[in-house]
Amino acid sequence: MKLQFDPSQQYQLDAIKSITDIFKGQPNGSDFSLELSQVLGQLPIINSFLVGNKLLLEPAIIKKNLIDIQQNNNIEISDEDNLWNKELIWQKEELWDDNTVSLSSGMNFSVEMETGTGKTYVYLRTIHELYKQYGFKKFVIVVPSIAIKEGVIKNLQITKDHFSMLYENPEMDFYVYDPKKRGQLKNFATTNALQILVINIDSFAKFSASKKGKNIIYKNSDWGVPMEYIQGVKPIVIVDEPQNMETDIRKKAIKNLNPICTLRYSATHKHHYNLVYKLDPVDAYDLGLVKKIEVDSIVSEENYNQAFVELKSVHAQKRRVNAKVKIDVGNKNGVSKKIITVKVGDDLYKLSGERELYKNNYIIDEIDVDGEMIGLSNGKNIYVGHSEGDYRDEIMKFQIQKTIQNHLDREKKLQGKGIKVLSLFFIDKVANYRNYQDGEVLQGKFAEWFEEICNNFKENPKYKGLLSNDIDKIHNGYFSQDKKGLLKDTKGNTKVDDDTYALIMKHKEKLLSLDEPLRFIFSHSALREGWDNPNVFQICTLNESHSEMKKRQEIGRGLRLPVNQEGIRIFDENINVLTVIANESYEDFAKTLQTEIEEDCGVNFTGRIKNKAKKKKVHLKKSYALDENFKELWDKIKHKTRYQVEYNTEELIEKCAQELENVEIKVVKLQNTKVSLNLTREKVDSHLKSFKEKDISIYNFRIPNILENIQNKTNLTKNTILRIIKESGKIEGVFKNPQQFIDIFSLKINLVLNKMMIDGIKYERIVGDSWEMKSFENDELEGYIDNMYQVQNQEKTLYNYIICDSDIENKFAQDLESNEDVKFYIKLPYWFKIETPIGSYNPDWAVVFDGDKKIYFVVESKGKNETENLRDSEKLKIKCGEKHFEEFEDVEFKGPVKDVISLLS
């Protein structure tokens, strides 16, 4: 299988543009060459040259570009202090006294994208765009962990063909830093082509050249100091998950790379340095860019028949230690669980309201703060997060059963669609899955339970054919190994984990194939960062202690949208659902996740996590094909069309020239600032001595092929583009700032062109091609009660429930049903799409009105009757809908409409 990538996803293009526009006005081909001996005087190599990045824009232009981007993206404007991040510019370097850090190293820009929305794809494509638009060649990707490093490498590999096709086979190399490859950084620095270096922060965070094998990147040798090759080319640094690199040492290490700027990508930034783009969890969820989340909750009922004790925490105070424990407490109203504070000598029998179960042997004998445990007088030790008397094994076994059941139900639903279903179990002890005794490999209790439950399901007629006889082939574990090849518990950041992450990434496509029998995967909780397989539909955490894993980390492993056997992403919301099998109540899970998102992202996620118990199937009425109203309506609207666009070239030239008349192409300037520095033990103080601006328009820019560049962005002929340029009267802008000229002209031309194309669009019916009525039978629709309207009169429509995308649609459905003039209506299925020049369009409703003559409407409901507040793309697609249905007899397209009454007005 080969994963496919869609290059036209608007949110990703917006994220990319938010970075590339920072450098708007930068001439293309902005690189430089320096003889190595000029930079690295001790090197014996005389005839080699560094090829690096060169930033020609003065800070004022970058500042204006940044503010424009933030305003366009509705992001709070950076204040003056944050704009240049003075802490990262002026702080004295104590670790590298002899290294001067350039002013531009303070240029940090942040992109926030929710997990699973293609953050790595976005920054890799941003690299290609920065190379294409401005000629920047040298990029360093800094990662905080082995898992993320392996993920980046995998993405570089699987996107290589995609980017080669998209960017016409650019010459490009990527390297994974390896201190054993002595010439690697020299090649990176001297190669005159697009170069990408992936490096772990720990490889250069500490200046420790004297320690054998540690940070050799700072050690001088026959090849020079490796770090100086990076510094010499002034790379653009991309920091993946920067919240893990916010210590002073790590921030200084990144600055020491001498970047012209640092681009920071994360879903959970600790600090937003000049935020330029934000796609938070709510945005991603509402736009359908990640799977919906449902929780299959497993908790024990209020069963108070055992002496329950759970240790929540231990605390050391000045004169004594205490602990917080949860126990069952009885009072006149019954029994309930309560958290209480205890000290050594306390008797849980008395603290429980003298419940008989705690009588004798439940006295606190010991509280060990370092060991995070308490000792009871019955000889049992309980550790933080662990408990006694709560049916832990029974709950975990039931979690496995529910995971398998959810998995098989989903496989049955997706039969014939070519979508592999995977389930992921995170466990905290390898021994619970694989055990060793006298050199023999044995099954742990989880593996035993799993096979026992699968064999039970195999006998169930409902799942006939879904489980093979070889149960052992459908589950396996991904764990790290010791030198003898034995599986072991690790923390996710050791050398042996490196191989495990590489194996997980290596098997990514293999696991997506229906030919591969493995469907249920067990992995250590510490390795969770390594998992990003898009076809994980079930996640189950099986910990003998209460999991400390954040909910966002847990669901993040399964949020990505799935792919089919062709590697094509699936956008069907009825398929894209992640089920979390939780050992806590749905309410607790939702509350915790909401709190995390509010803390991490500053947004409210209330009500967006669905209770599986409130999920309903939508049923198509059996007699739908015999319904005369439906048949008549469908026969009217079922035909497919093709379109052609017509526009008058002379009119296009005239309108583009008018649009460009008031455009100003600004001259590129250099700013020269001279300061005196006063060094004290407290800080480095600066005093401005002089400031100058220099117009560099007198220098000879390498003028790119203006016509070809604009043609690539607009698809117009060169002759038409030339005439637009001449008639705009802005030809001198080419010599002032050629790249800005290309950008602005392309943008304005496309704006005019799209409007004119759709104004002149013509549709024609395709003879013999239409949407088949039987397609309704292939849809397996289900949704949540909160997002559905329950139909009262099914004579007027096809389904018992209508899935609504908004409160506006819900109200519209109610009005359609209650209005006596409405004879019949349907919510149009997702596959009913009209092709347009700017993407496919799916109208909302089809409605039949009764009267002297039946009236057939296709409707776009927006809660308003005017288009003025709609996005440009929405306006243009609605216009295409009107043109499409003009080819249909007795059918009228209406949109946008506020309510049902507006249809007849």
Image: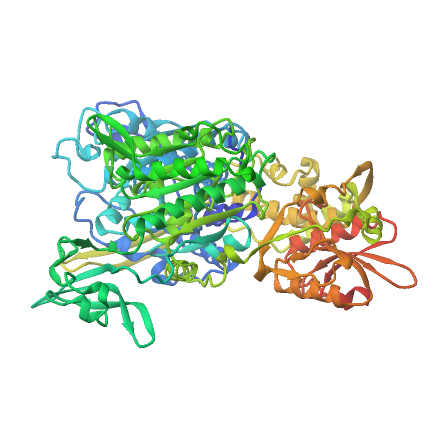
Q: Residue furthest right?
A: 852
Q: Is residue 233 above or below residue 395?
A: above
Regarding residue 61, the answer to whether it shows in the image is no
| Left or right: 286, with 304 as reference point | right
Please report the residue visible at 26 percent of the width from the left and 39 percent of the height from the top: 493
- In x, y percent, where is residue 179? 24, 29
Q: Is residue 231 left or right of residue 290?
A: left
**Number of marks in the image?**
0
- In which quadrant of the rendered view does residue 326 lie? bottom left
Query: Does any portion of residue 679 appear in the rendered image?
Result: yes
Q: Position of residue 686 (x, y in %)?
A: 24, 58
Question: Where residue 421 appears, x then y in whole percent?
Answer: 50, 38
Kindly give the residue lying farthest to the bottom in the view shown: 332
Residues 868 and 316: in front is 316
Dividing the picture into quadrants, the one containing residue 444 is top left
Q: Farthest left residue?
A: 319
422 or 699, which is in the foreground?
Answer: 422
Instruction: Identify the residue at horizontal 29%, vertical 57% (top origin).
Output: 86
Is 693 placed left or right of 736 in the picture? left
- Left or right: 812 with respect to 241? right
Front-most of residues 843 and 655: 843
Q: Measured from the top left, where is residue 399 in percent x and y?
A: 40, 47
Image quarter of the C terminus? bottom right
For this rendering, which residue is in front, 136 or 886? 886
